[in-house]
Image: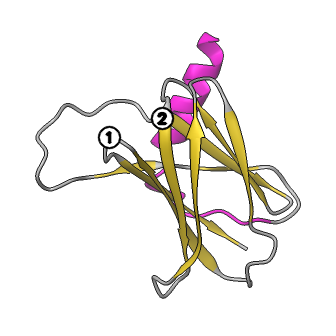
Amino acid sequence: MKAKILFVALLMSFSISLPSYSMDDEHVIIILKEKELVDENRPRTGVPISASIENGIITTEMSTYSGTISVTIKDEDGDTVLSTVENVSSNSQFTTNVTSLADGSYTIYYTLDNNSVYYGEFEK
C-alpha cells in the first residue's frame, strides 16, 4: 500500500512536465489536477480519484470519495463531446468508453458534488 501511494505521488509530481498522454493500445495513466476555484480559500487535499486509459476505455477509480461525480470530456476547441453522471462510493471504479471520439486532444473533467473539479488531458 505504501509503495502504491509513493508511486502515485511520484506520478503526480511529473504532471507539470507531462501534460498529455496518448491513447494507443497501452495502459496510460491520466494525471489529474485540481482546478482552482477562485472563491475558495480551503486547504489543498490529495486527489480522491485517479484515471487511466487503455484501448479507448477510461477507468476511473475512487479512493476516498463517495457521492455524485459528473464526467465531461471536451475537445481541443472546448466543445463538450461526452457528458455523464455517475454515483460512486469510495474504493470503487467505473469506465467511460471513448473509442468513438475522433483523433485529437481531449480534456476530461470530474466535478464532485462538493463542487471540487479535477481534470486531466489525453490524446486519441
Using the rendered view, name the quadrant where residue 46 is placed.
top left
Using the rendered view, name the quadrant where residue 45 is placed.
top left
Q: Who is closer to the viewer here, 18 or 40? A: 40
Q: Amino acid at mark 1?
A: Asn
The residue at the point 56 percent across, 24 percent down is 90
- Chain-order first, disc 2 or disc 1: 2
Q: Who is closer to the viewer here, 123 or 67? A: 67
Q: Position of residue 82 (x, y in %)?
A: 61, 72
Task: Give the residue furthest to the bottom.
Answer: 77
Work out how far the residue at label 2 is from the one at label 1, CA to CA, in angstroms: 9 Å
Q: Secondary structure at mark 1?
A: loop
Task: Give the residue furthest to the top.
Answer: 2
Please say if the residues under marks 2 and 1 sit with CB atoms less than 8 Å apart: yes
**Mark linked to residue 71:** none
* Image quarter of the N terminus: top right
Residue 21 highlighted magenta (yes or no): yes
Q: Is residue 12 left or right of residue 35?
A: right
Query: Mark 1, residues whose alpha carbon is within 10 Å: few (<14), some, or many (≥20)?
Result: few
The residue at the point 59 percent across, 11 percent down is 2
Please tell me whether residue 7 is drawn above or below residue 106 in the rendered image. Answer: above
Q: Amino acid at mark 2?
A: Gly
Badge 2 is on which residue? 67
> Which portion, as a residue range, is magenta?
1-23
Badge 1 is on which residue? 114
